[in-house]
Image (tube, rainbow, N blue to C red):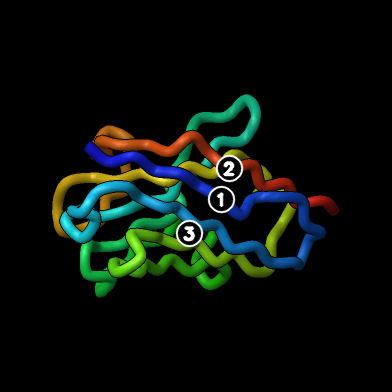
Amino acid sequence: QVQLVESGGGLVQAGGSLRLSCAASGRTFRSYAMGWFRQAPGKEREFVSAISWSGGSTLYADSVKGRFTISRDNAKNTVYLQMNSLKPEDTAVYYCAARSGMVGATTLEEYHYWGQGAQVTVSS
């Protein structure tokens, strides 16, 4: 069982930056690949980024590639999402997710545990 708690969301102007953190409970954090998803009002939850258990492999949605960076610190049981050059269309609730396995994945069904979400609002 893994419990995930996101933090770091907020309101930022277009072009600004935010860093989301996701703290995981449990001593087996390094056994899980991690992902970030987001859900805007009226839209389905979509993949943003994922990282392997070691941090050596990452995946990004085309819409955030070059602007967002995912990383993890296994000593701190935490995964991060650094978001730069934010756009109004990045406004959404951002969810952290964990899946048993070594590599990240891009679909919701492949993740077993979810956080409660963090609101990110980008004003124009």
Depth check, mark 3 against mark 1: the one in front is 1
Residue at (52% x, 38% y) in the render:
117
Q: Is residue 4 above or below residue 55?
A: above
Taking depth in this image into account, of 61 and 18 the one nearest to the observer is 18
Q: Which residue is mark 2?
A: 118
Q: How many marks?
A: 3
Q: Is tag 1's residue or tag 2's residue first in the polypeptide sequence? A: 1
At x 40%, y 68%, the residue is 71
Q: Amino acid at mark 1?
A: Ser
CA gap between label 3 and label 1 equals 24 Å
Q: Where is the N terminus found, in terms of image quarters? A: top left
Residue named by callout 3: 62
The amino acid sitting under disc 3 is Asp
Q: CA distance from mark 1 to mark 2?
A: 6 Å
Check disc 1 and report the residue beneath it.
7
Q: Position of residue 10 (x, y in %)?
A: 71, 50
Foreground disc of the pair 1, 2: 1
> Residue 101 versus residue 14: which sits nearer the camera?
101
